[in-house]
Amino acid sequence: MATTMERFREVPSHSVPADELEVSRLALDCICRALGLPASIRLRWFRPLNTFDESAEACFGAPPWATFADDERIRGRMNQRDGSEIWVRSHGGPRRVALTVAHELRHVAQVSTHGFLINAADIDAHHAAIEADADDFASSAIDVLLPNLKP
């Protein structure tokens, strides 16, 4: 199946639904403690670019917000250089946001423990196993740590 790329932009936390902000902060705190990760990991938000964003770019040049292109289905990403931040797609609902936070933090732990994502060859060779591990961890962790989140 071909991957469809889409452009995304960073959004400020005040534009994220309150229930998503609340659950993301709770998940970040709980999962960092569970994985022994530093509490200093930064959470950033993104969403697809819309026509207003594209028009502003065309008129004014480089936008004042971070942008990137990725698979249109992306729900999150992590800073692969040092694991100091994770990015989460906004407006997905509280459970999806919590699962994404847990998934991305698992990747941070994978890097700090095994260095999996540092080497591009490792990404290709182990991608399916790395993603499956992060998915399994996220599902289990959220069910245990935040059992009241509805699917």
Image: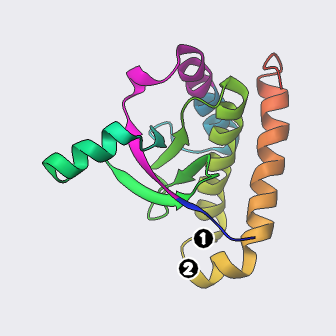
Image coords of residue 150 (percent x, y): 82, 20
Image coords of residue 20 (percent x, y): 58, 22
Q: Is residue 132 left or right of residue 114?
A: right
Query: Is residue 145 in sight in this rendering?
Result: yes
Residue 60 highlighted magenta (yes or no) = no
Give the crowd class for mark 2: few <14, some 14-19, many >=20 residues within 10 Å.
few
Q: Is residue 149 above or below residue 115?
A: above
Give the residue type that dot 2 points to: Asn
Q: Is residue 112 above or below residue 13?
A: below
The residue labelled by disc 1 is 115
Residue occupying image coordinates x 64% and y 33%:
97
Give the residue type that dot 1 points to: Gly
Badge number at residue 119: 2
Quadrant in which the N terminus is drawn = bottom right
Residue occupying image coordinates x 67% and y 32%:
98
Q: Is residue 33 left or right of residue 52?
A: right
Give the crowd class for mark 1: few <14, some 14-19, many >=20 residues within 10 Å.
some
Query: Is residue 65 in sight in this rendering?
Result: no
Residue 18 highlighted magenta (yes or no) = yes
Residue found farthest to the bottom: 121
Q: Nearer the viewer, mark 1 or mark 2?
A: 2
Q: Residues in magenta?
A: 6-26
